[in-house]
Amino acid sequence: MLDILDPSREVDPRYLNYVVTTRKGQSLTGLIAAETASSLTLRRGEKAEDTILRDQIEEIHATGKSVMPEGLETQVSKQDLADLIAYLQTVAAPK
């Protein structure tokens, strides 16, 4: 429940949001989906991805924020939130 209400309180490093600024001044955001010696791939919502060549990267930094949107509980109905919590309880239950 706490992760839904305050998603950036304690963020697993795998879900940190990053901002990459290219040498051309373009800013791209997302979580790091893949890294190679020559490129970095950021994943955004809906599994959209941006691959940036390392020699085109001016700066990269973690925002310290989760990719999960803050205020999600205000954007869904009470019933949808209750359904989400019920679902999470069923998949997290020991088998």
Image (tube, rainbow, N blue to C red):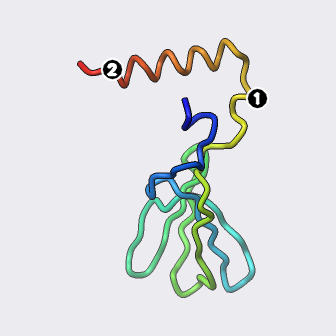
Question: How far across and how far down the image is residue 93, in percent?
Answer: 33, 20
Vertical side of 83 occupied by 57: above or below: below
Q: Is there CB contact under 8 Å for labels 2 and 1?
A: no
Quick one: SS at disc 2?
A: loop
Quadrant where the C terminus lies? Answer: top left
Q: Which residue lies at the image location 76% right of the left edge and 29% below the top edge? A: 74
Question: How far across and how far down the image is residue 63, in percent?
Answer: 62, 64
Q: Which residue lies at the image location 54% right of the left edge and 62% below the top edge? A: 42
Q: Which mark is residue 9?
A: none
- Residue carrying label 2: 93
Amino acid type assigned to the residue bearing label 2 in the image:
Ala
Is residue 15 shown left or right of residue 71?
A: left
Quick one: SS at disc 1?
A: helix
Vertical side of 86 occupied by 55: above or below: below
- Residue carrying label 1: 74
Location of residue 17 (image quadrant): bottom right
Is residue 31 shown left or right of residue 79?
A: left
Comparing 81 with 1, the one in front is 1
Question: How far across and how far down the image is residue 16, in percent?
Answer: 53, 57
Q: Which residue lies at the image location 57% right of the left edge and 14% below the top edge? A: 83
Q: Residues within 10 Å of mark 2 (few under 14, many from 20)?
A: few
Residue at the left extreme, as displayed? 95
Q: Which residue lies at the image location 45% right of the left edge and 52% below the top edge? A: 12
Comparing 58 with 90, the one in front is 90
Vertical side of 56 occupied by 45: above or below: above
Count numbered badges in the picture. Answer: 2
Q: Earlier in the sequence, mark 2 or mark 1?
A: 1
Quadrant where the N terminus lies? Answer: top right
